[in-house]
Structures are given as C-alpha cells and as structure tokens.
Image (spheres, grey):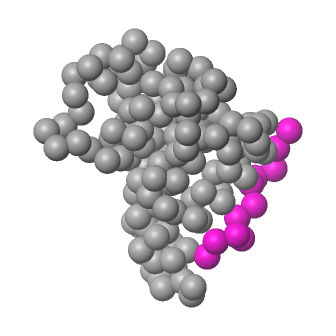
Amino acid sequence: MQQRIHYMKIAPDAFKAMLGVESYVRDSGLEHSLLELIKTRVSQMNGCAFCLDMHTKDARAAGETEQRLYLLSAWRESPFYTERERAALLWAENVTQLPVGGIPDEIFDQVSRSFDEKALVDLTMAIIAINGWNRLSISFRTEVGTYQPPKAHAK
C-alpha cells in the first residue's frame, strides 16, 4: 500500500502536538518496558502494522524477550507478565475499547492496586497517545518496515 499523506510534513504542528504528549509520557516515570508492552498491545488491538513494527523493535532493543512479545495478545493465559503489567494491559484494553457505560469500578479498583493516581493518569495518557498514533498511521498508511530503533535504546 502506498502512503496517502505524509502527515509529519503536511501538518508539522499537529505532529509536534502528538510529540508533546509522547514526551510527557516518556518523562512520566513509568517503566520503558511497560510502555512498550502497552504500545504493542494497543497496536495489536487496533491492527496498526507500522506501530507494531516500531514498538516490537523498540522493545527488543531495550531487552524485551521474544517470548513475552509473542504471547502478548494472550497475556491473560501467559505466566510471563507481572501483576503490574497485567493491570496495565487490562487498563489499556478497556481504555482502547471503552465499554458502554464506561470502565467498571471493579476494573478501576483492580488497576488502582498497582498504580497510584498519578501513575494511572500517566498510563492513561500513554494509552491515549498510542491510540492517536495508531489512528494516524492507519488512516494515512504510514509505510511499514522502515523504522529502526534509536541507538540510545539498544543494549
């Protein structure tokens, strides 16, 4: 598929706004590994090939295992994720596909056991950001496969 619009060039201020949210999330104090799992899982749910390519490469460059990446879509059935990661994945799925009537209290309560209020806001901002990037990449058919992780993340 051919890219429809190079949104970074056509609307640099919009791109800059998205980068501002991304910068906030990166500096929020949430673990890089957790953020990459969230970005990958949300991108799986949304079917965003560009973001899946990017975030699995970034996760691997930061030391994530192949096994955890392969089993991410089945995280509930896999023993390889921490309680905090499971809470974040649960929250990510619910924020990405908001249930009618909102997220149930029992899910909020479960996630709140692993994240304080500030961290939960930050996690939600991370989920909002990747959903936004997914929608840009899918809508405008960002070219898949060209992304290379920055050297700073490589071990």
Residue 30 pos. (x, y %): 54, 28
Residue 29 pos. (x, y %): 54, 26
Residue at image position (16%, 44%) is 100
Relative to 135, 71 lies left or right: right
21 or 81, which lies in front? 81
User: 117 above or below 18?
Assistant: above
Residue at image position (59%, 20%) is 82
Residue 125 is at least partly visible in this image = no
Residue at image position (46%, 70%) is 138
105 or 128, which lies in front? 105
Residue 74 pos. (x, y %): 55, 39
- Residue positioned most to the front: 77
Magenta segment boundaries in residue numbering? 143-155
Residue 155 is at least partly visible in this image = yes
User: 143 above or below 127?
Assistant: below
User: 89 above or below 151?
Assistant: above
